[in-house]
Amino acid sequence: NKYQKITIVRFNTTILNTYEPSQQLTREQLAVLLTAIVKYNKVSVYLNEDAAVSKFSDAAAIKNRGAVAVAVMLGLMQGENGKFNPTQTVSKAQAATVIMKLVELQGKIDQKIGEQ
């Protein structure tokens, strides 16, 4: 496989999340990846009860609430009809839209995306 695994270490738990390129990606997993890409993992720990997530009628089904809150607050992702739909798979078109939003976000956050 020409793609490599993407591994994200969450700072607030000992969970190591690994996503294989051949697997389908859920909306919640995408939020976790986006939070790691913009290096807001530590901030996400404090956003578990944020209104950005609790407003969704399916908030109880969201395990990584802080990551979802970051993605929503940065405008990278949004809910639909009052739900976030954390287990819904992300299409290539949806992923491309989010990536373009991430590109637009570049320069508006305190650290360059991907910078160590």
Image: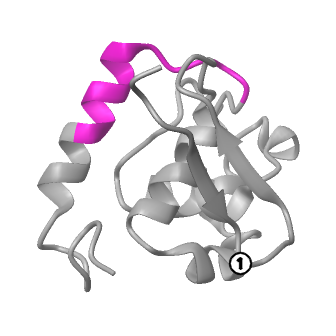
Rendered residue at 68%/44% (across/down)? 18
Relative height, residue 78 to residue 17 (above, below): above
Q: Nearer the viewer, residue 108 or 59?
A: 108
Q: Which of 105 and 79 is in front in this view?
A: 105
Residue 77, magenta (yes or no)? no
Residue 43 in picture, x, y percent from top left: 57, 82
Query: In this image, 45 relative to 69: left or right?
Result: right
Rendered residue at 62%/58% (across/down)? 8
Q: Count the marks.
A: 1
Q: Magenta residues: mostly which secondary structure?
A: helix
Rendered residue at 63%/19% (across/down)? 23
Rendered residue at 47%/19% (across/down)? 1
Residue 98 in picture, x, y percent from top left: 32, 37
Residue 93 in picture, x, y percent from top left: 31, 15
Query: In this image, 12 relative to 104: left or right?
Result: right
Mark 1 sits on what residue?
Answer: 11
Please report the bounds of the magenta region as a residue range: 87-99
Q: Which quadrant of the structure image shows residue 62?
A: top right
Secondary-structure class at tag 1 = loop
Relative height, residue 86 to residue 88 (above, below): below
